[in-house]
Amino acid sequence: QVQLVESGGGLVQPGGSLRLSCAASGSISAFSAMGWYRQAPGKQRDLVARITVGDNPQTMRAVEGRFTISRDNAKNTVYLQMNTLKPEDTAVYYCNARGRYTGKDYWGQGTQVTVSS
């Protein structure tokens, strides 16, 4: 059973930085892509950034230039570096992984990010 464990969320002031980590229970090479989604209260869950098995990172326009996704295969971990945070970045951030051969989606439990002064 695949498990994804997120960490690194918290309260930060506008303009600050956080780094989220998503540790997988097995090799992340088993996934065709891993990504970060976020969900604010009363809103749908949206893709923030993803990285494919070929190390092709993609970030959504709302966070482009501020957020960076990366992976460490040796640690089976994917990171989301978030800089110049804004109040509108406040949300629960979820790690996602898609099975390379099954196409099945796996989700972490989520980590809260709050940007407020």
Image (tube, rainbow, N blue to C red):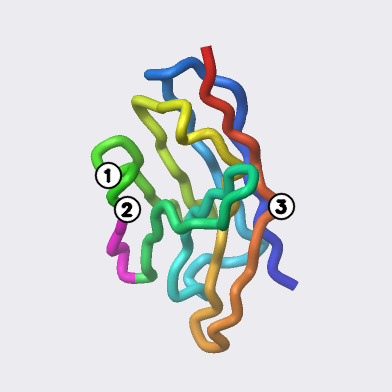
Mark toward the start of the polypeptide (3 vs 2): 2
> Looking at numbered disc 2 in the image, what kind of residue is underneath it?
Thr
Residue at the right extreme, as displayed: 1
Crowd rating for badge 1 (residues with CA inside 10 Å; few <14, some 14–19, many 20+): few
Q: Residue at x 47, y 35 (%)?
A: 89
- In contact (CB < 8 Å): disc 3 and disc 2: no
- Residue 64: image tag: 1
Considering the numbered disc 3 on the image, is that residue within a helix, a strand or a loop?
loop
Q: Which residues are magenta?
A: 54-58
Identify the residue position indicated by label 3 in the image: 109
Q: Whole-Å distance between the Cαs marked 3 and 2?
A: 21 Å
Q: Residue at x 70, y 62 (%)?
A: 3
- In contact (CB < 8 Å): disc 2 and disc 1: yes
> Looking at numbered disc 3 in the image, what kind of residue is underneath it?
Gln
Residue 4 screen position, x and y as percent: 65, 57
In front of the other: 41 or 23: 41
Residue at the left extreme, as displayed: 65
Is the N terminus in the top left, top right, bottom left or bottom right quadrant?
A: bottom right
Considering the numbered disc 2 on the image, is that residue within a helix, a strand or a loop?
strand
Residue 101 screen position, x and y as percent: 52, 88
Q: Residue at x 31, y 63 (%)?
A: 55
Q: Main secondary structure of the magenta part?
A: loop
> Looking at numbered disc 1 in the image, what kind of residue is underneath it?
Glu
Q: Residue at x 44, y 43 (%)?
A: 80
Crowd rating for badge 3 (residues with CA inside 10 Å; few <14, some 14–19, many 20+): some
In front of the other: 90 or 5: 90
Q: Whole-Å distance between the Cαs marked 2 and 1?
A: 6 Å
